[in-house]
Amino acid sequence: MTKDFCEYCGADLPSSTKPVTVHRQRRGRHFIFERVPARVCRGCGERSFAAPVVRAMDRWMKKPKAGFEPTPVPVVEWRACA
Ligand SMILES: [Zn+2]
């Protein structure tokens, strides 16, 4: 079920989605999902994802599709660059 109010600030959520970039982690591996449909709160900018969208990302992290080639991404701890 889709929430119609932002759970953080209580503002109305827009009915339409817009594509956003999502960073997630699973078992120490980082995943960046691009152009994920989200309802973005006009009040605070918090992003709300429909349950099937979250489940689709979960499935992908458990089992990426055959032929998917990971892109190397630098991961830098702050103290290494400060
Ligand atoms: Zn909000």
Image (cartoon, rainbow, N blue to C red):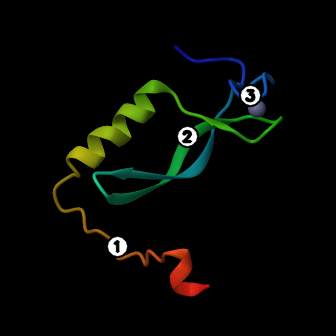
Alpha carbons under labels 3 and 2: distance apart:
12 Å
Left or right: residue 62 versus residue 71 is left
**Count of marks overlaid on the render:** 3
Q: Residues within 10 Å of mark 1 (few under 14, many from 20)?
A: few
Toward which corner of the image does residue 49 lie, by quadrant? top right
Q: Are marks 3 and 2 in contact (CB under 8 Å)?
A: no
Left or right: residue 44 versus residue 27 is right
Task: Identify residue type, mark 2.
Answer: Pro
Which residue lies at the image location 34% right of the left edge and 73% below the top edge? 71
- Looking at the picture, does residue 52 appear above or below residue 60? above
Toward which corner of the image does residue 6 lie, by quadrant? top right
Closest to the observer: 34 or 23? 23
Residue at the bottom extreme of this rendering: 81
Residue annotated with mark 1: 71
Residue 37 is marked as 2
Query: Is tag 2's residue or tag 1's residue first in the polypeptide sequence?
Result: 2
Alpha carbons under labels 3 and 1: distance apart:
33 Å
Q: Secondary structure at mark 2?
A: strand
Left or right: residue 77 versus residue 48 is left
Q: Is mark 3 within 8 Å of ligand 1?
A: no
Alpha carbons under labels 2 and 1: distance apart:
22 Å
Q: Secondary structure at mark 3?
A: loop
Residue 14 is marked as 3
